[in-house]
Amino acid sequence: MERKVALITGVTGQDGSYLSEFLLGKGYSVHGLIRRSSVDYRERIAHLEGTPNFHLHYADMNDSMSLVKLVGLVQPTEIYNLAAQSHVQVSFDAPEFTADVDAVGVLRILEAVRTNHLEKSCRIYQASTSELYGKVEEVPQNEKTPFHPYSPYAVAKLYGYWIIKEYREAYNMFCCSGILFNHESERRGETFVTRKITLAAARIAQGKQDKLYLGNLSSLRDWGYARDYVECMWLILQHETPEDFVIATGVQHSVREFCYLAFKHVGIELEFQGEGENEKGIDKKTGRVLVEVSPDFYRPTDVVNLWGDPTKAKRELGWNPAKTTFEQLVALMVEHDMKKVAADDAASRVHMNLAEYLEKGVVK
Ligand code: NAP
Ligand code: GDD
């Protein structure tokens, strides 16, 4: 019988958790790399722990030896390299750490595979990103669009993209990049803009937060559902030849639109008035200002026009980019957060603190 053994770095993250569920469902033995943390908080994969085919191992993307040992122990047939410092704003504050994990980390994985002589038997997926297009040179973006990275995060990820391509050509390895556009979910980190908005809408609707502060409301993104996107990671590694693919919905919306729709789902209709730093989202019914702009959330350089063209993935992988619509995505995130905020008093107290920090611009 064919061995199906997957090693996932970044298993505790949004995508790692969905990918684990997906691969377990396909009969894989799934091994996840976790790093030591003082709180050992693994909320997104807690429901999988104890599943017979699901195994966790300590290692770190900054520690080559731990990666070499782990790859040797697991002998994976597929590696999904999802681990990263994935927050663009944070990459301006911690650029060296970001480069170490997001750029050199990719090289360490490739070398761990070579050191264990698995280059002919192990396929590797690299979590590349639409941030590579950065200060975009054409709209929409496809596999041939030139890159113009526009943050320390994107520059680090560009190294990851090229080193994967280099090892594919130099050593004939089956390693590929999925150039994924933004994908969100109920499990999205709370300081990414979509989740920050859905949690705030839920808290404001339940009287637990007064106001939401955001940065650039006009920024445009192609937002998809993370659960749909992990299937593509797997499809890319099942493809006959190792190739890179853009994964996106092909539909673009602004942060302002996301905000409007999220609040509408909790019964608040917002009207946006003013411009730039003076723009406000006002509750049409009560006249209360619920959304304000804070320059604390502006970035030194911001990527403002991401819009993906998934034609190649549709054609060659048979992937359906329209499985979950933008409207469905917003609805499922808001519904989840309405329940979360209502159900968990202790948690919402923590969230209120976080919200206060967010309002002061301490946590981006
Ligand atoms: P995420 O929720 O932030 O998860 C990142 C994962 O990386 C976490 O499991 C984290 O572990 C792990 N990690 C960070 N530093 C590490 C280190 N030094 N050693 C080991 N593990 C480390 O990110 P995501 O949204 O799931 O995204 C997954 C990947 O896709 C990332 O590479 C991201 O850059 C890329 N990507 C994401 C999107 C998107 O829209 N979500 C789009 C394009 C590309 P801890 O839990 O211990 O922090
Ligand atoms: N985080 C955040 N917080 N972003 C805000 C805010 C805010 O208060 N207000 C406006 N924005 C704008 C940002 O300036 C950016 O233009 C856009 O909203 C999206 O920001 P994020 O949700 O933080 O995501 P991102 O696009 O920068 O990065 C995500 O997607 C990339 C793929 O394009 C991350 O998941 C990356 O890891 C991923 O590579």
Image (cartoon, rainbow, N blue to C red):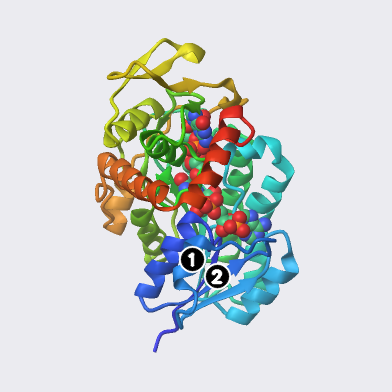
Q: Position of residue 226 (x, y in %)?
A: 39, 52
The amino acid marked with disc number 2 is: Gly
**In the displayed structure, does residue 78 sit left or right of residue 309?**
right
The structure residue drawn at horizontal position 36% and vertical position 35%, both measured from the top left corner, is 205
Q: Are marks 1 and 2 in contact (CB under 8 Å)?
A: yes
Q: Quadrant of the C terminus?
A: top right
Query: Of the numbered discs in the image, which one, if any, rests on residue 45?
Result: 1
**In the displayed structure, does residue 309 sit left or right of residue 194?**
left
The structure residue drawn at horizontal position 32% and vertical position 28%, both measured from the top left corner, is 260
Image quadrant in which you'd find residue 12: bottom right
The structure residue drawn at horizontal position 59% and vertical position 68%, both measured from the top left corner, is 33
Q: Position of residue 102 (x, y in %)?
A: 63, 50
Q: Quadrant of the N terminus?
A: bottom left
- Residue furthest to the bottom in view is 1
Can I make out residue 303 in this image?
no
Seen from the viewer's position, the closer of residues 261 and 149 is: 261
Seen from the viewer's position, the closer of residues 274 and 152 is: 274
Circle 1: element type = helix
The amino acid marked with disc number 1 is: Ile
Query: Of the numbered discs in the image, which one, if any, rests on residue 90?
Result: none
Judge: label 2 CB < 8 Å from ligand 1. no
Q: Residues within 10 Å of mark 2 (few under 14, many from 20)?
A: many
Image quadrant in which you'd find residue 140: top left
**Above or below 241: residue 93:** above
Residue under numbered circle 2? 32
Measure the C-alpha gap from mark 1 to mark 2.
10 Å
**Above or below 200: residue 349:** below
Can I make out residue 66 in this image?
yes
